[in-house]
Amino acid sequence: MEGKRVAIIGLDCWDPVLVEKWRDDLPHIKSLQENGVYGKLRSTDPPITIPAWSSMMSGKSPGTLGFYGFRNRSDYSYDKLSFATSHMVREKRLWDILSDAGKKVIILGVPQTYPPKAVNGILVGDFLAPDTKSDYTYPKALKEEIERVVGDYMLDVDDFRTENKERLLRDIYRMTKQHFDLARHFVTTREWDFFMMVDMGPDRIHHGFWKFFDPAHPKYVAGNPLETSIRDYYTFVDGEVGKLIEVLPADCAVIVVSDHGAQPMIGGVAINEWLIEKGYLTLLSRPETPTKIGSVKIDWQNTRAWGEGGYYSRLFFNVKGREPEGTIDPADYEAFRDRMIEEITAMTDERGAIIGNVCLRPEDLYREARGIPPDLFIYFGNLAWRSVGTVGLGSYITYENDTGPDDANHSFFGYVSVTGTRKNGVREGLSIFDVAPTVLTIMGMPTFKDMEGKIIE
Amino acid sequence: MGKGVTLWLTGLSGSGKTTISEILEKILRDAGYKVEVLDGDVVRTNLSKGLGFSKEDRDINIKRIGFVCKLLTRNGVVAIAAAISPYREIRDYNRAEIGDFIEIYCSCPIDVLAERDVKGLYKKALAGEIKNFTGVSDPYEPPENPEVVIESDKESVEESVKKALDKMIELGYVDPQRLGFGYSEEDEEKVKKRLEDLGYI
């Protein structure tokens, strides 16, 4: 398996459990499995779009990349968070390596590619582009071609938090179809050695529609009219994958891959409410209605920790000599961290049942942690619960999301299939870090010693 | 003080070295970086005055430019050298001496350059009126692993400049925010709202 072209069809959040469940409805996905190797792909910690795709494309951990989410602390002040745009990526990703080697690339919508950087080929930036008025393509003029081929380009679906599910569903279909249409256009009108697209549709449909199909979801109602929406969408995506493969060169290796999976969201933990209750966080005045933590005044001199919302929680400590009004003596740092781990692990829901939180230190996860990592990573209910950053809820347990309806949380395993391998079949123990060295090997290029993965074969 | 670096633009006469170095100089200086440009044509009127175009003289010229770049670089300056610098060995010597070194290869086919012939030199060189003219009657050894390749026959000056700045950002020599490469306030709010809606933050 050497010197071949590679096409990566990236499907954000495409879930291996659902693929297995509906395999017989997904003839093209199934055929790719039968013509190569496939399996569950362990995501990064945290299993979130950023950093997961950049880790996959560089073979480097989030710690090495210095990304722990979409926004990261840029210094030890309390409020400075910077967006993890392409400019913040210091490690080479596959298209950088391949461009340097003179290979032609087509990159479409891969997270962390806005603002677009020069490649040896073309690049369409991701949904971190503010809108299509911005220069979201390389070269700049590519934008006009996109508009000519597919009309108004959809960076993402708009107004995601909505109860108007019919409209949302239509938009998700429209976006996915458009991205596959554009992919077919690019691969058939250009010379290329490496093609990669990422469509966010699967992620959006999981978050928006999970409760309608999964009896394990607390809000599931049997016989609801949207019960088959996710399965129907999976078969639609399968059809699009089939149409794309049809126009790919026969000798090209095809990789279908996701960055993480999904699971029903059971509830939310309002981490800052919990910290207030325990006396670790003090507000100058406590709001009576739900308010973002960034919008309330914190009494820093009486605060030891605060947390960020998201699919997982990042806990930050207020350390003397590090934060502007630090309260934790550096000598007590580890003892405080141990105490937090113990207390957060023992956290219960409103009925007194243990939630099952998992706390991890950066050094538990990474060889190195660049930038400013959180002092603790918390997976509430091992990711079945969301982290809610809001205060003023009156309780740290909530079943309403602070940002509107959301049915799913992420899970640790994404999906991968690779064609053109010497042997076929299912593989165990695959990691997101395996993708980059595998692609380089298929393309007949040397791999890099500092890539963390191994070759899938 | 920022970390110094040498941007070494190499390529045939008329391939865009001076144009690109002037734009880079302005952008970097406006962003608050200390910048000096060592343009081959200018250097030959002072630092290397009297040197000719034999291989030996060319090597001395390029080593002198490299030496000044080294001093500037170690003092936190972005030193931009724009010189044909046809010999790989001397460019690599400068790279080794300076350390923080970004080689920018301004590549352009000779027929395009002869067609453009901004300074009217190719016409004369091709007619045999100029001796030792790189690319016509003197060799040019393209870099084997330049950090940046600029193709001035295929891309706009703006794109070429962006390639160089992107490489500086990637290698950590400049801060994208300082270059104004970050979001505008309005865009930042838009992106923040989208990410909140999507549940990421």
Image (spheres, coloured by chain):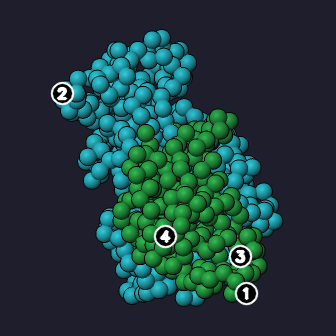
Chain colours: A cyan, B green
Q: Which image quadrant: the N terminus of chain A?
A: bottom left
**Residue A242 vertical position relative to residue A46 in the rendered view, above or below:** below
Chain for disc number 3: B
Q: Secondary structure at mark 3?
A: helix
Alpha-carbon span between mark 2 and mark 1: 78 Å
Q: Percent from the top left, x then y, of residue A211?
A: 55, 47
**What amino acid is at disc 1?**
Ala
Q: Are marks 3 and 4 on the same chain?
A: yes
Chain for disc number 4: B
Residue drawn at x 44%, y 62% is B64
Residue A17 visible within the image: no
**Residue A373 vertical position relative to residue A253 in the rendered view, above or below:** above
- Residue on which disc 1 sits: B127
At label 2, counting other C-alpha atoms closer than 10 Å, the crowd grade (few under 14, some 14-19, many 20 or more) is few
Q: Which image quadrant: the C terminus of chain A?
A: bottom left
**Residue B35 vertical position relative to residue A327 in the rendered view, above or below:** below
Hey, which quadrant is residue A240 in on the image?
A: bottom right
Alpha-carbon span between mark 3 and mark 1: 10 Å
Chain for disc number 2: A
**What amino acid is at disc 4?**
Pro
- Residue on which disc 2 sits: A331
Image check: A118 left or right of B58?
A: right
**What amino acid is at disc 3?**
Leu
Q: Nearer the viewer, mark 2 or mark 1?
A: 1
- Residue on which disc 3 sits: B121
Q: Secondary structure at mark 2?
A: helix
**What amino acid is at disc 2?**
Ala
Residue drawn at x 35%, y 26% is A323
Alpha-carbon span between mark 3 and mark 4: 27 Å
